[in-house]
Image: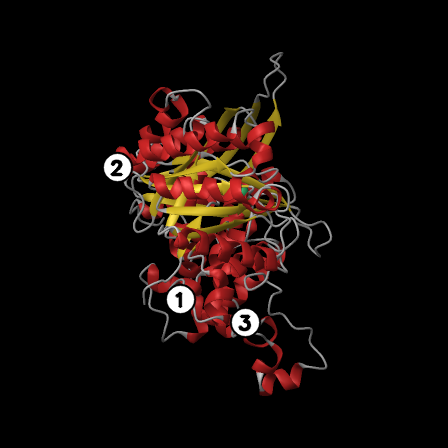
Amino acid sequence: MSSDLVVYDTTLRDGAQQEGMNLSVADKLTLLPLLEAYGADIIEGGWPGAIPRDTEFFRKVTAEGVLMRARLAAFGSTRKANVDVGDDQQVQALLDSQAPIITLVAKSDVRHVHKALRTTEEENLAMVEDTVAYLLSHGRDVMVDLEHFFDGAVVDRDYTFSVAETAVRAGASTIIPCDTNGGSLPGEVQSRVAELIDHLAERGLSATIGIHAHNDGELAVANTLAAVAAGASHIQGTVNGYGERTGNANILTAIANLQLKTDRKVVTEQQLAEHTHISHAVAEIVNIAPYGRQPYTGVSAFAHKAGLHASAIRVDADLYQHIDPARVGNDMRMIVSDMAGRASIELKAREVGLDLSQRPDVLSEVTKRIKQAEAQGYTYDATDASVELLIREIATGERMSFFEIESWSTHLSGSSSESNVAEAVVKVRTGRGRAVTVGEGVGPVDALDQALRGALAPVYPELDVCELTDFKVRILDASAATRATTRVIISMSSPHGSWATVGVGRDVIDASWEALTEGYAYGLFKAGVPKR
Ligand SMILES: [Zn+2]
């Protein structure tokens, strides 16, 4: 099945503008395969030249060739006013990023040309024309975001359309009208996009028309669909609708609506069935609690209150839901979640080389344990190593064990230094006897890590190449009926791959300790070390 719409993901650029979101280069690299897996055709990685971390990200992505299918886009602006395009450093940084696609933002509202750019209408058109032509001459596919398009068209339609026309005449393959302030209504968007398509056609011009909508009126997805209805064939958005203020169009909702409610083919059915998992995994990586009532992918999206409807739902579930939740990888919690849970666990087991299709008892037990753990605050969407250890433990009847912790403690040392020096003492039993080690670190978790490494290093030299790459803390909802208050996700990597584990506890140290010991156990397992 081939797609008839281009899906342009801007989670890593516009989505990362969300208040409180702070993505490292490593986070962005971790997100890439998830963005590809939901069906993004183009992934906008950031603004090289303007943001140093983004420059680094592009260097890594292009050097390591990590993208399997999607094409990479770099975002930037047209050249500065009254500067030769070849002398504009920001434009040069876009070329240096090596991204095959460059998406330029161009002012298309005359008020912004005067007040924000402080230049003339003619110079703004020249900036668009020069920059598009220059990047094109360097072999790039150039797309142009028409900033404030819909608001601009209300004030001075002719000028707004002339910016669009200039971009197309200069060679832009795609132009994207943007509802930058997010206040437009679907009817306006639909008629304006249709008008733009006619305007270009009347002049013998053609280009792919896109849509970039913000959610200030809670209409970003509706406006995306309205633009598609008018003939747009390139949709921009972010996973879970991340973005500044109230966010961007949630690309997952837009895709599900188009694919399941209209005759558009946007992604494969397999990709669509990954959406719930991807929505949750991305939320874990960006460290923002998933929104339970999010359409299609939220945990409550198909949940029914038991009672009046229960027996009717058992007879015909379709009477009470707008789609079959399995199509987006979700499930109807009340009745079928056990079955759906089992299917995904069987799949996960097969991924790690265990065939559980003939072992319904093991599947039931793993499902039960995962549900219990989730109720306590654990999460398994982005912590594959913890899931694998649990499946292996239940399938083989024994815990993956390389060392046994006798006790551990931490305290802040009484040094005069103002830096936060912590000490940890760990008592561990390994195949070679008992070890008591002290670790020092910049905080208690670092100190525990140092102490544990110290204890294990003489017995397990394999851990030398295990690196703690990331550490995420989430304070859990205090209203939940659980005593655990903190969840920690730890990411590690070694030449054998990278993995993540989860721990839950009364405080961050408690939770970290669990995630840390599990992370090292998994690292030893991956290195082929025999169990104790
Ligand atoms: Zn935007």
Residue holding disc 2: 139
Give whichever of discs 2 and 1 has the lower sequence position.
2
Give whichever of discs 3 and 2 has the lower sequence position.
2
Mark on residue 337? 3
Q: Amino acid at mark 1?
A: Lys
User: Residue at 48% of width from left, 33% of height from top?
Assistant: 449
Picture quadrant of residue 223: bottom right
Q: Is residue 108 left or right of residue 464?
A: right
Picture quadrant of residue 232: bottom left
Residue holding disc 1: 265
Q: Amino acid at mark 2?
A: Gly
Identify the residue at the far top of this view: 416
Element marked by disc 3: helix
Element marked by disc 2: loop
- Give the quadrant of the N terminus: bottom left
User: Residue at 42% of width from left, 57% of height from top?
Assistant: 233
Residues packed near mark 2 inside 10 Å, few (<14), some (14 to 19) or many (20 plus): few
Q: Is residue 260 visible?
A: yes
Residue 18 spot, x, y in % from top left: 58, 40
The residue closer to the viewer here, 277 or 467, is 277
Identify the residue at the far front of this view: 202
In the rendered view, would you say 135 is above or below 351? Answer: above
